[in-house]
Image: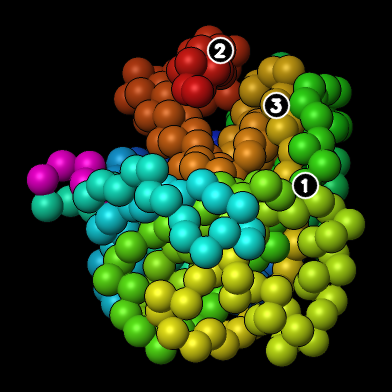
Amino acid sequence: MIAAVSAANAPYDVVVAGGGMVGLTLAVALRSALGEGVRLVVCDPAIDDDGSPTRASALAAGPRRMLERLDVWRAMDGLAQPIRRMEITDSRLADAVRPQFLTFDAEAEPGEPVAHMIANRDLVAALRARARALGVELRASAARDARAGPILSTVDLSDGARIEARLIVAADGAKSRLRDLAGIGTIGWSYAQAGIVATIGHERDHDGLARQHFLPAGPFAILPMTGRRCSIVWNERVEDARDICALPPDDFLAELTPRFGRELGRLTLLDRPVAFPFALKIARSFVAARLALIGDAAHVVHPIAGQGVNLGLRDAAALAQEIVEAARLGLDPGGSDVLRQDERARRADP
């Protein structure tokens, strides 16, 4: 049974390895629901790092509603850009005209945008502040080793500490150390493509319009950010993406402009472009003894529809629900029945 414990060396109910959006959302959800009735810690050596200014995400309506209920979303006021319309085109790069194959208002419900564009670092900062306000322990240390026992797991941290927990949650990314330590394999493949990500300034207002151009090399997405800015995700072969990112800013913009178009006026490069390889990777199991995988530790997907972060946040919501129900029934949050139920729920999510 989860119970409040005051002793400094007492076991934790939940240890979350990974202090990104997904791990922090889980911690905030648990603390919001159970208060001091759950003893938990989030471990991440970069827990106070502001993160990359380049990465941005399209947050779907469902996860946004969850963040509203967790009293996190109000901190994003003025930082989140609603996606109000979508435009899909298909053409060759040299084509003078790009036919619009699909244009539609992007609403989840009447008056509610289907998604908001956010800078990842802004949402992480808001989640971190909310976690601290709720009294969640945030520890600047990595989980280096974990061993599951019949009642508790032991976790060795990079700061030399050894802690115990009823449940360990691996929110430590696509190269999850905890997943590997548990012997959980993965299936998947590389797409032999990379996404060039950068923030682009422009002269004219975008009016909340997101564009997806299907070009021969792959999709080219223009995603509206606050102000006269857009985030781009530019698909190219891995080798070509690396070379494009290495170009001087003026040469980069010369390559970008025919793909971006001139509808928004003169373009400026606001940050250094970065290329991220695309791959599919699915864990063969989302759980092991006293261990649950969430976010990229469980599944890495192609970002064409912006589903990666939304899948991870749904992971956090589902696991939080299972842990909260276990607590209210006096059950072990790391028990096999609880974890099997969580895996059944998450495997069904496309």
| Image mark for residue 282 | 3
Q: Quadrant of residue 127?
A: bottom left
Instruction: Count neighbours of disc 3 (C-alpha within 10 A) and say few if under 14, some if 14 to 19, many if 20 or more.
Output: some
Main SS, magenta residues: strand
Q: Earlier in the sequence, mark 3 or mark 1?
A: 1
Q: Earlier in the sequence, mark 2 or mark 1?
A: 1
Amino acid at circle 2: Arg
Residue displayed at 85% across by 32% down: 181
Magenta-drawn segment: 106-110
Residue displayed at 71% across by 89% down: 250
- The residue pinned by badge 1 equals 193
What whole-number distance in Å separates the C-alpha atoms at marks 2 and 3? 17 Å
Q: Mark 2, mark 1: which one is toward the viewer? A: 1
- The residue pinned by badge 2 equals 340
| Image mark for residue 306 | none
Instruction: Count neighbours of disc 1 (C-alpha within 10 A) and say few if under 14, some if 14 to 19, many if 20 or more.
Output: many
Q: Quadrant of residue 236?
A: bottom right
Circle 2 — which element?
helix
